[in-house]
């Protein structure tokens, strides 16, 4: 067995589920232990892979550059933030023309607002411009992964499903409906520039 730590698999999740994944945890006391976000469909995610339309970018930093990107998929909106510790991602957000289809691999991060709400954002490891076919394929594969997680969701046998059942007052079938709606948006020829009207900001 190699002692070299392997990179965590990047999970696929739609924006609606990602934004609901406000509970984070570590599985050991080690300072270097990975931090996981708990997806409501019963899977842990240290890294996520998302593809959507980068709708706008903004430098929200005070003393140094700190770029925020808003990425839309068929279910809602991801926010990603990159600064001096993510120079390549920050450069991408600085230089990209919007709108553009992008693929992002990154780590979920949570923060609490002044009102006490938990918000989830993405700290990017990489931001890559892709084409619409890649975005559409991501929607299909993410819908499949989401439905697989829902079908396997069993708090009696899965530690993470039990944790999600305890932490979130959210019926997992909500995410099945979102996945199906995302697939239907492709059939309708909709693009991610026009998310569902009830998509979360």
Image: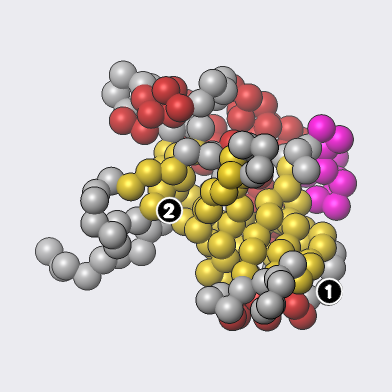
Mark 1 lies on residue: 97
Q: Position of residue 23 (x, y in %)?
A: 47, 38
Q: Does 187 appear in magenta?
A: yes
Give the camera-side residue of 162 and 185: 162
Instruction: Please tell me how crowded label 1 is: few (under 14), some (14-19), or many (20+) other residues with Cα within 10 Å.
Output: few
Main SS class of the magenta portion in the image: loop
Displayed quadrant of residue 83: bottom right
Left or right, residue 183 beside residue 159: right
Displayed quadrant of residue 74: top right
Q: Which residues are magenta?
A: 186-198
Left or right, residue 23 beside residue 73: left
Rendered view: 179 above or below 94: above
Q: Which residue lies most toward the left here? A: 1
Mark 2 lies on residue: 46
Identify the residue shown where x is 80% and y is 50%.
Answer: 192
Identify the residue shown where x is 59% and y is 57%.
Answer: 122
Would residue 153 be visible to someone looking at this image? no
Mark earlier in primary sequence (1, 2): 2
Q: Does 129 appear in magenta?
A: no
Identify the residue shown where x is 75% and y is 51%.
Answer: 72
Rendered view: 9 above or below 97: above
């Amino acid at each position: 067995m190699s002692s070299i730590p392997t990179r965590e698999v990047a999970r696929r999740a739609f924006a609606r589920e990602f934004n609901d994944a406000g509970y984070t945890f570590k599985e050991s006391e080690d300072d270097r232990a990975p931090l996981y976000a708990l997806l409501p469909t019963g899977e842990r995610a240290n890294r996520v892979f998302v593809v959507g339309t980068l709708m706008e970018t903004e430098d929200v930093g005070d003393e140094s550059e700190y770029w925020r990107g808003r990425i839309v998929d068929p279910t809602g909106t991801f926010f990603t933030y990159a600064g001096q510790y993510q120079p390549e991602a920050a450069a991408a957000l600085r230089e990209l023309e919007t709108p553009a289809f992008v693929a992002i691999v990154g780590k979920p991060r949570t923060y609490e607002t002044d009102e006490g709400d938990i918000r989830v954002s993405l700290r990017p490891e990489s931001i890559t411009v892709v084409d619409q076919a890649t975005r559409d394929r991501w929607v299909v594969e993410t819908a499949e992964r989401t439905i697989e997680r829902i079908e396997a969701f069993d708090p009696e046998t899965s530690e993470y499903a039990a944790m999600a059942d305890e932490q979130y007052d959210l019926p997992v079938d909500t995410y099945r409906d979102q996945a199906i709606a995302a697939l239907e948006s492709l059939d309708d020829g909709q693009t991610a520039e026009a998310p569902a009207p009830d998509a979360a900001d």
